[in-house]
């Protein structure tokens, strides 16, 4: 399923996947990002415009063809398998029941990808929740040499620092299942707020956040 979806995405240098267009023609959107609606009381609905802005940035700079409006999916729903990338954000509690944990695992093992955004305060909840999905895996900090930091945009020092939060350094963690990165967790930086346009972040910070988001997208489709 996901292999079929991947072939519909057109990155720079992948001209073979671009159909011949007449002047004035535009391609209909072929893919859509999804926001995870989880239980537990955390504000999963935060960062209203983040995915819209990320989709627009990727379309403009990676030649993807994302629909600008994102979908909302629940972790236990069969609908989640329609989306190659699911994004989860928030400040508070995140819980998966047994069915949701099994479904999330099936989604990630089947080729799906989860972006976890620490909007400040998510860390104590997201780690045990993902441990329920993959009991045998732990989050590992990705080295600066990891390909996710060296896609279209170069981040030689790893994930950029967007928001201060506790004043700790920004970190990018991952879950590796059978050698494949299935989940990227940004901690103490808040990429999602950088993607959104309701904050007064300096333009260079917003640009770095969007560029890092584009790197994640490009990496996912290149795995």
Image (spheres, helix red, strand yellow):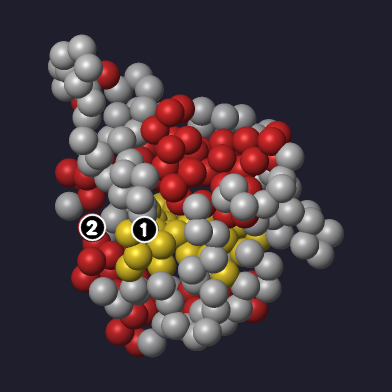
Q: Position of residue 2 (x, y in %)?
A: 23, 50
Mark drawn on residue 34: 1
Q: Is residue 130 above or below residue 211?
A: below
Q: Position of residue 169 (x, y in %)?
A: 78, 54
Depth check: give the residue in front, 127 or 205: 205
Task: Name the residue rendered at 56%, 40% in the picture.
Answer: 210
* 168 to the left or right of 154: right
Depth check: give the residue in front, 99 or 54: 54
Q: Nearer the viewer, mark 1 or mark 2?
A: 1
Mark 1 surroundings within 10 Å by alpha-carbon count, few (fewer than 14), some (14 through 19), many (20 or more): many
Mark drawn on residue 82: 2
Mark 2 surroundings within 10 Å by alpha-carbon count, few (fewer than 14), some (14 through 19), many (20 or more): some
Q: Is residue 31 visible?
A: yes
In the image, farthest residue toward the right: 167
State the count of labels: 2
* 68 to the left or right of 79: right
Q: Position of residue 53 (x, y in %)?
A: 49, 44
Dot 1 falls on a residue whose secondary structure is: strand
């Amino acid at each position: 399923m996901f292999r079929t979806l991947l072939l519909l995405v057109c990155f720079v240098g992948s001209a073979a996947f671009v159909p011949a267009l007449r002047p004035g023609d535009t391609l209909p959107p072929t893919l859509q990002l999804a926001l995870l609606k989880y239980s537990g009381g955390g504000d999963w609905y935060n960062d209203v415009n983040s995915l819209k802005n990320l989709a627009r940035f990727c379309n403009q700079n990676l030649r993807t063809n994302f629909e600008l409006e994102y979908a909302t999916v629940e972790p236990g729903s069969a609908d989640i398998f329609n989306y190659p990338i699911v994004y989860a954000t928030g400040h508070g509690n995140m819980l998966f029941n047994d069915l949701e944990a099994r479904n999330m695992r099936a989604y990630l093992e089947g080729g799906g990808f989860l972006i976890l955004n620490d909007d400040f305060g998510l860390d104590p909840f997201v780690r045990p929740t993902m441990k329920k999905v993959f009991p045998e895996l732990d989050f590992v900090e990705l080295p600066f040499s990891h390909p996710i930091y060296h896609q279209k945009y170069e981040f030689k020092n790893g994930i950029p620092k967007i928001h201060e939060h506790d004043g700790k350094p920004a970190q990018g963690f991952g879950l590796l299942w059978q050698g494949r990165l299935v989940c990227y967790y940004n901690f103490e930086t808040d990429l999602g707020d950088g993607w959104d346009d309701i904050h007064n972040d300096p333009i260079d910070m917003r640009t770095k956040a969007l560029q890092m988001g584009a790197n994640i997208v490009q990496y996912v489709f290149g795995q």
